[in-house]
Image: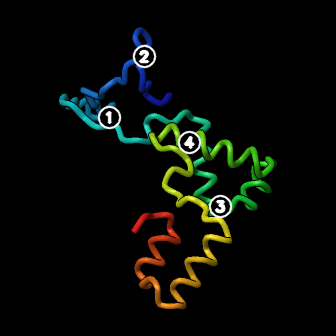
Amino acid sequence: MRPAPTRCPICQSELSVVKLHCPVCDTSIEGHFVSGHFANLTHEQMEFVFTFIRCEGKINRMEQELGLSYPTIRNRLHEVIRALGYEPGKDEPAEIPQERRNSILEDLSAGRITAEAATRLLRGEEV
């Protein structure tokens, strides 16, 4: 059995599920159903996700199991993340230069800023 297509072969719009059918008792249910984020993944991407979960997200175990390099596995993970509608690394805080980090910690130590302000600054937020 093949996975259901998620895109229209004519215009490439997202397809919607409107009918479900049981092959055993011949029951059909019609309506508008949500297929979920994972429906957008290719078969290969789903296999990658299953392996990722089985390896508990440990890339070194994935390297051994798949026989692929770390950069290749990271690239495939980023492809899956994008297929799910996210951008890899987007939610990661901006890297604070060590000199700026030291300055924030000195200000905190000297009492010029509060712990809350220091935490926000270290996260890259403005106070």
Q: Secondary structure at mark 3?
A: loop
Q: Nearer the viewer, residue 114 or 70?
A: 114
Instruction: Indicate the position of residue 34 as horizontal and vertical percent values.
Output: 29, 37
The three-letter amino acid code for the residue at tag 2 is: Gln
Residue holding disc 3:
55
| Element on which disc 1 rests | loop
Question: Could you say which disc has been placed on residue 24 in the image?
Answer: 1
CA separation, marks 2 and 4?
19 Å
Outermost residue on the top side: it is: 10
Q: Residue at x 47, y 90 (%)?
A: 111
Q: Residue 59's spot in the image, x, y percent? A: 70, 58
Label 4 residue SS? helix
* Kind of residue at disc 3: Cys
Q: Residues within 10 Å of mark 4 (few under 14, many from 20)?
A: many
- What's the residue at 50%, 64% (across, down)? 124
Q: Position of residue 109 (x, y in %)?
A: 54, 90
Q: Which residue is mark 4?
A: 80
Q: Which mark is residue 12?
A: 2
Q: Image quadrant of residue 45? A: top right
108 shown above or below 3: below
